[in-house]
Amino acid sequence: MPIGLSAVGPLSGKLSDRIGARMPATVGLLLQAVGVYWLSTVTISSSYRHVAIGLALTGTGGGLFFSPNTSAAMGAAEKGRLGVAAATLATLRNTGMVTSFALSLAVAARSIPTRLMMQLFVGTEVHLRTSVKYAYVHGMEIALHISVIICLVAAAMSLVRGREVRHG
């Protein structure tokens, strides 16, 4: 995921300087939706390769989205308010990531008995019954399907965003 973000981010920034943020950001969100959907197909017997493909798609989509979206937000800020705009954008981005991670884990973890969940999340070695593993994977599938919907809504909002700011 970080490889996709760091490899594609600078390229999408240059692209958005030429054509505006709307299309790279929207395509990035759609690619993230594909990656998250791919991850929702993980089973207890999935290979690391299967997981890596989903993470790569998600990271590449993030790389396409973050640079153009940041550029558009900063371009819309008044010159004397760039610091406030950058801080607000970073706060919203971090809040969204932390909140989505916590909610996803909460949705997935509700399928595991509380005692086992607490042991698992504090790092205690836990041997889960196959039925509990299947329940957890099903919980993650639900959480990831919700994330796909959020990505698609965000892509629709990105597509209809306000006027384009081009820097090139």
Image (cartoon, helix red, strand yellow):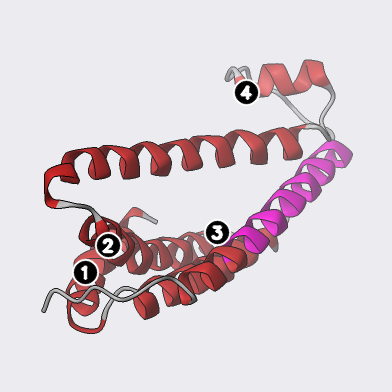
Residue name at image x 62 percent, y 23 percent: 121
At label 3, counting other C-alpha atoms closer than 10 Å, the crowd grade (few under 14, some 14-19, many 20 or more) is some
Q: Quadrant of residue 147?
A: bottom right
Label 1 to label 3, Cα distance in Å?
A: 27 Å
Residue name at image x 34 percent, y 75 percent: 163
Label 1 to label 4, Cα distance in Å?
A: 37 Å
Residue name at image x 40 percent, y 44 percent: 93
Residue 19 or residue 79, whichever sits in front: 79
Residue 90 — which label? none
Looking at marks 2 and 4 on the same chain, the residue that comes earlier in the sequence is marked by 2
Three-letter amino acid code at the position of disc 2 = Ser
Label 2 to label 4, Cα distance in Å?
A: 33 Å
Three-letter amino acid code at the position of disc 1 = Gly
**Mark closer to the observer (2, 3):** 2
Label 2 to label 1, Cα distance in Å?
A: 5 Å
Does residue 15 lie above or below 146 as drawn? Answer: below
Three-letter amino acid code at the position of disc 4 = Phe
**Mark closer to the observer (1, 4):** 1
Three-letter amino acid code at the position of disc 3 = Val
What residue would you read off at disc 3? 51
Label 2 to label 3, Cα distance in Å?
A: 25 Å
What residue would you read off at disc 4? 121
**Mark closer to the observer (1, 3):** 1
Q: Main secondary structure of the magenta part?
A: helix
What residue would you read off at disc 2? 67
